[in-house]
Image: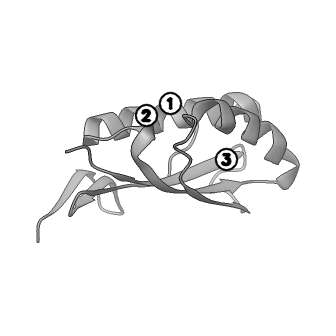
Amino acid sequence: MTITRLETKQRMSRIVKHNGTIYLCGQVCADATKDITEQTQTMLDKVDELLISAGSSREHMLSATIYVKDMSYFADMNAVWDAWVPEGHAPARACVAAKMAREALLVEISVVAAEIR
């Protein structure tokens, strides 16, 4: 069994690949001073980049766990999510309210995807 770890630091790897499955570490926005809509969009842009670099795409997502600072952001986050997920390719998903690592962060996502063969 081969496990490939990419962009590994002391605490985590940004991408881990094993048996055709790709695991992304938690992704957050590019600019935490923005609102929930822009934080969600730039977070998903990062997911796109990482999936492509790992040999996958959003069409091959298996599961996603979304952490929202406050459920009052749920509808606005979902509007961006719904526009981003290709029709017919929605992954298994969980969404929970969670305390963020930095106060300004409003949303974070962790994704598991299948590698494109």
Q: Residues within 10 Å of mark 2 (few under 14, many from 20)?
A: some
Q: Residue at x 56, y 51 (%)?
A: 109
**In 3D space, how far apart are the residues under numbered discs 3 and 1 (Cα atoms)?**
13 Å
* Left or right: residue 5 compared with residue 44: left
- Residue 117 lies, in percent from the top left, at 19, 45
**In 3D space, how far apart are the residues under numbered discs 2 and 1 (Cα atoms)?**
5 Å
Q: Residues within 10 Å of mark 3 (few under 14, many from 20)?
A: many
What residue is disc 1 on?
A: 45
Residue 86 image-quadrant placement: top right
Q: What element does badge 2 sit on?
A: helix
Q: Are marks 3 and 2 in contact (CB under 8 Å)?
A: no
Q: What element does badge 1 sit on?
A: helix
Going from N to C along the chain, the mark reached first, 3 or 1, is 1
Mark 3 or 2: in front is: 2
Mark 3 or 1: in front is: 1
What residue is disc 2 on?
A: 48
What residue is disc 3 on?
A: 107
Q: Which mark is residue 81?
A: none
Q: Residues within 10 Å of mark 1 (few under 14, many from 20)?
A: some
- Residue 103 lies, in percent from the top left, at 72, 50
Q: What element does badge 3 sit on?
A: strand
Viewer-proximal residue, 35 or 51? 51
Visual colour scheme: one colour
Q: Residue at x 25, y 43 (%)?
A: 116
Q: Are marks 2 and 1 in contact (CB under 8 Å)?
A: yes
Q: Residue at x 80, y 37 (%)?
A: 76
Q: Quadrant of the N terminus?
A: bottom left
Identify which amino acid the numbered label 2 is placed on: Asp
Going from N to C along the chain, the mark reached first, 3 or 2, is 2
Identify which amino acid the numbered label 3 is placed on: Val
